Amino acid sequence: MTIQRPRRPQMQGAQSGVVLLTVLMSVAALAVLGGTIAVLSSIDIKTTGFFKRSVDAYYQAEAGVHYVRTRIEADLKTNGLALSAPVETVTYTAPATMQFGDVTQLLRTSDTNSYYYEVTGTSLTSRCKVGVVFRRRSAFEMGLFGDKEIEMKAYGNVYSYYSDEITTPGPSDSTGEAYIGSNEEVLTGQDTLIDGSFQVGEDTSGAQGIWKETPPGGSIIEGDAALPADRVDPDPLGALSGDLANDFAYYSLATNNNNDSASPPITSPQYKIALNNGVSMTLSAGNYYVADINLKNGATLNIDSTSGPVTIYLTGAMEAKEGSSINFTGNPPDFRIFSNSTDSIILKNGGDFKGVIYAPYADVHILNSGDLYGLIWAGEIEVKNSGSLYIDLSAMQGFPSSSIVFLSWKEIR
């Protein structure tokens, strides 16, 4: 018997072609996918590099903004920059470790106390421009400051306003920016109202200042109370060894002061203003060098600032007794009393007082029954008056320091 083995199936030509085509298509798809991945990887690398350079350009601009700031402050400190013109020409070039374009102009803004500059940072082909608005800080961080103490008696009110916007404000005109403080002690009484905040700094040993409230919980503080702070320079203008001390020396010379222009004149060698009952004196625009001021009951000191500010350089005590008058109708920045003495300044007069009192080593006692408008910076301040104190923020801006503060910051596309 013959046994027949099964025949092996034979692959047809069409089937073989299909398999080959499928293999070729798979290889082609893999090739395309590989190419796509390579292209995407290349794009991703380029995008990552571009993003990195863009970020680096921004950081270069940011570093440039701060570098220019240090240059501005250095120039202000040495009087190499005044910030008084609409356009201030400067030349601030990037040091070797930074990459940003030259800054050649500081432009005054619509707010005449502010200026604007731009810095363009670079990183290879990437650019980033940052613009900032800044202004000079005031030499006075507070409108009412007593190095050792501020004492506010019961029912005392402290408000704030801008004298270049309103001449005689009321409580409803307060801007809520009444900022006061001491390095050592703030005392507030029953229903003392501060429409703003106050701070306590540090004494010469570094001990934190304190707040005493009598009775506890009896004061009204609209902002923050007893903010802890570093020690504040009690003499930012340099009454004993600084710019103000130089002014005292300059105006002590008869040829440089306006003592002879007073009516009646302030005569040497005493250089005193001593006005008895019914006697008056007028000080017009100018700088006066005075050893003492004593206004007795019924005396009147007229301050005429129609032609310019009136400044008194006081080397001794001042007392305006009850019933005396300091007659000044202008704005606080136009009447200034600078003291380099430890002798007290006492205001007992019955009317309002407008002006700036800077006496960093003296005690200032406000006992009058009128309102006070302006700025007081002293060794100690005692406020017993039954009126209100209006801190003039315009007066504070009139004493710029060499440091600046940024008001706005933006990246310019």
Image: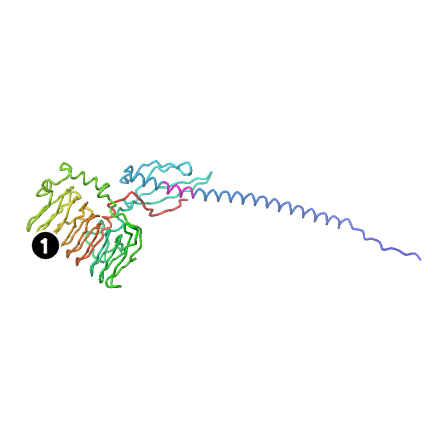
Would you identify the image quadrant in which residue 80 lies?
top left
User: Where does residue 62 sit, x and y in percent of width and height?
Assistant: 40, 43
Outermost residue on the right side: it is 1
Q: What segment carries the magenta color?
A: 59-67
Outermost residue on the front side: it is 205
| Residue 205 visible in the snapshot | yes
**In percent of the image, x 54 and y 43: which residue is there?**
45
User: Where does residue 395 sit, x and y in percent of width and height?
Assistant: 22, 48
**In percent of the image, x 48 and y 44: which residue is there?**
52
User: Seen in the image, is 234 located left or right of residue 30?
Assistant: left
> Disc 1 on helix, strand or loop?
loop
User: Where does residue 344 sit, x and y in percent of width and height?
Assistant: 16, 50
**In percent of the image, x 8 and y 52: which residue is there?**
298
| Residue 199 visible in the snapshot | no
User: Seen in the image, is 143 located left or right of residue 54?
Assistant: left
- How many marks do you count on the picture? 1
Q: Main secondary structure of the magenta part?
A: helix
Quadrant including the N terminus: bottom right
